[in-house]
Image (cartoon, coloured by chain):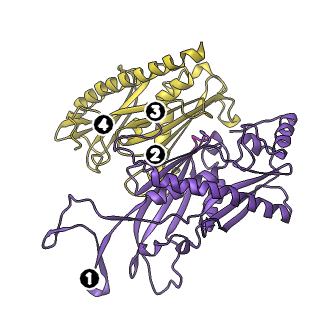
Chain colours: A purple, B yellow
């Protein structure tokens, strides 16, 4: 969607932001309304849908795959995540065909950077290493259904929601011939080697309380703004993606900083923007954890988007 | 397989007009098959695609990487999705009154969020409703269904478990549930004796699906009436 604003409209927006008031009544550090739903897709191991300000709409789905690797050739265990972002043409006709691929690539690279030290931020992630030579590969796929600014913020929320929703099946590992192992889903045995197929498999969940949140901070006029609308994005001087992960109750660690788009920034304003974002993320993070804990699970057959 | 009778379709749920950026949009569910569709246009499109006497139609079919049983590597651009895109284009060229918009272009985008069989049929139904939401003149609302044959008996609205490699299946789309066929696609081999029965069943099911879609469209128009005045 392309937005065209006249110079006067832009001036009005910029003057407002310098006085800490925005067109929709927010201050510069406020997010739009966030709607988060978990477990929306039955065909995935974990899924989440995030809506930002009624229009930016993001769907994240996770699929697990058993992967074998050569334990001798790998020195450091790589993170098990594989991020992939796709812009649906539904979001805007400019994303038709290969239109959104470059931007999507940039977004998935930022996610990968933010999650690069994932064994530290997800406490129990080591458990995905099943046995020598086998591990779960976690494919995190994000589809942008509607686009209306601040898409990386919505994506990072969606990824956390989906990771929280993700249930990884418990497996039983037994040694097999030739130094190999056989991996079987954990189910109670009914006798001998027969397993009860009716009983659902035990699952475990990841601890997502320290997952990084990514936010967009934009420089408009002399003010720094969080969660821009498309109208505000037309007045941007420069934009910064900041990835923050909580280390203690009120402290955040920066896991990713990236300048996007054109424009110049001074070193001091980079620091200002990062401190603004960490302030805003504090509120968002506690709200997110509260939501993840208290969300009621939907009944089977209930459908989203309706 | 899921407790339905052979001639019973899955539950259809719809929502229209949920995408604010697009002229028309629709979300449809056939059981667990979930499709989102958006229509942009008619607008002055690319010069290379412009036709002097009618409008050109551009379709894009894509399925999310997590839509199927196995993860896909690419959401679009593979052979199957390109083939489906072309099929949809050709089908809707004969449904939309293309003569009304010379020198313009209509974009139709389909996104399969979750695929559980009959994806193509669900896409056609979604597009029909999205076009109706956009207010684009058509000959009628197109409806579609996928039919398979097991031991000589036709079964309708296949799920992905039923869409096996060997089962012959026909996807049929008609306009307004009548005899005008806009799309037929047959996969796998089917004995010619069975063809007639399958086509008959598919045609009558198309009429049933049309009834559902028509009700949705009428409800939507009624809901929009206060805005349109």
For disc 2, the marked residue is B113
SS category of the residue bearing label 1: loop
For disc 1, the marked residue is A176
Q: Compare marks 2 and 4 and give the one earlier in the sequence.
A: 2
Image quadrant of residue A95?
top right
**In the image, residue B159 above or below residue A113:** above
For disc 4, the marked residue is B157
**In the image, residue A142 above or below residue B147:** below
**In the image, residue A23 above or below residue A253:** above
Q: Nearer the viewer, mark 1 or mark 4?
A: 1
SS category of the residue bearing label 2: strand
* Whole-percent x, y for residue A53 in the image: 62, 41
Q: Nearer the viewer, mark 2 or mark 4?
A: 2
Q: Which residue is at a point 78% across and 43% down the rendered structure image?
A: A234
Q: Which residue is at a point 24% across and 67% down the rendered structure image?
A: A187
Q: Are marks 3 and 4 in contact (CB under 8 Å)?
A: no
Q: CA distance from mark 2 to mark 1?
A: 40 Å
SS category of the residue bearing label 3: helix
Pointers 2 and 4 within a single chain: yes
Q: CA distance from mark 2 to mark 4?
A: 18 Å
Please check the rendered image and state whether residue A91 is part of the magenta-colored stretch, yes or no: yes
What is the span of residues highlighted in magenta in the rendered image? A88-92
Q: Are marks 2 and 1 in contact (CB under 8 Å)?
A: no
Residue B172 shows in the view: no
């Amino acid at each position: 969607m392309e937005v065209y604003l006249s110079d006067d409209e832009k001036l009005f927006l910029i003057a407002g932001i310098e006085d800490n008031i925005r067109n929709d009544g927010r201050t510069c550090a406020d997010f739009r309304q966030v709607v988060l739903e978990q477990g929306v897709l039955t065909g995935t191991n974990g899924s989440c849908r995030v809506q930002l300000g009624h229009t930016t709409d993001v769907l994240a789905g996770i699929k697990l795959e058993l992967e074998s690797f050569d334990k001798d050739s790998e020195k450091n265990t790589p993170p098990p995540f594989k991020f992939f972002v796709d812009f649906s043409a539904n979001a805007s006709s400019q994303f038709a065909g290969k239109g959104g691929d470059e931007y999507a690539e940039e977004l998935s690279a930022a996610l990968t950077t933010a999650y690069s030290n994932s064994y530290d931020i997800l406490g129990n992630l080591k458990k995905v290493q099943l046995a020598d030579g086998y591990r779960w590969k976690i494919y995190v796929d994000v589809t942008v259904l509607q686009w209306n600014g601040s898409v990386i913020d919505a994506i990072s929320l969606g990824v956390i929601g989906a990771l929280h929703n993700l249930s990884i099946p418990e497996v039983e590992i037994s040694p097999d011939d030739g130094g190999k192992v056989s991996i079987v889903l954990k189910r109670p045995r009914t006798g001998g080697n027969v397993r009860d197929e009716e009983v659902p498999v035990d699952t475990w969940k990841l601890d997502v309380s320290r997952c990084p949140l990514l936010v967009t901070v934009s420089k408009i006029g002399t003010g720094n703004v969080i969660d821009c609308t498309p109208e505000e994005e037309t007045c941007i001087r420069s934009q910064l993606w900041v990835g923050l992960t909580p280390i203690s109750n009120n402290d955040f660690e920066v896991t990713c900083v990236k300048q996007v788009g054109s424009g110049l920034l001074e070193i001091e304003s980079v620091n200002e923007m990062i401190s603004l974002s960490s302030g805003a993320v504090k509120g968002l993070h506690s709200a997110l954890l509260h939501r993840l804990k208290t969300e009621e699970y939907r009944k089977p057959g209930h459908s989203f988007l309706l | 397989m899921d407790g339905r009778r052979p001639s019973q379709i899955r539950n259809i749920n719809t929502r229209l007009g949920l995408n604010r950026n697009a002229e028309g949009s629709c979300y449809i569910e056939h059981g667990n098959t979930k499709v989102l569709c958006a229509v942009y246009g008619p607008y002055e499109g690319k010069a290379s695609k412009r036709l002097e006497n009618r409008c050109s139609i551009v379709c894009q079919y894509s399925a999310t990487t997590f839509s199927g049983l196995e993860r896909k590597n690419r959401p679009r651009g593979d052979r199957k999705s390109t083939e489906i895109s072309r099929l949809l284009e050709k089908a809707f060229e004969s449904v939309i009154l293309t003569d009304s918009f010379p020198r313009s272009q209509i974009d139709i985008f389909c996104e399969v969020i979750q695929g559980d069989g009959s994806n193509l049929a669900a896409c056609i139904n979604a597009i029909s409703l999205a076009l109706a939401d956009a207010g684009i003149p058509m000959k009628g609302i197109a409806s579609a269904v996928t039919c398979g044959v097991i031991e000589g008996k036709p079964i309708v609205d296949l799920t992905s478990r039923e869409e096996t490699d060997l089962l012959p299946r026909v996807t049929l789309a008609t306009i307004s549930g009548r005899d005008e066929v806009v799309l037929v696609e047959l996969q796998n081999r089917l004995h010619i004796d069975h063809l007639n029965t399958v086509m008959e069943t598919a045609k009558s099911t198309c009429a049933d699906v049309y009834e559902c879609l028509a009700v949705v469209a009428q409800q939507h128009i009624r809901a929009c009436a206060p805005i349109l005045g």
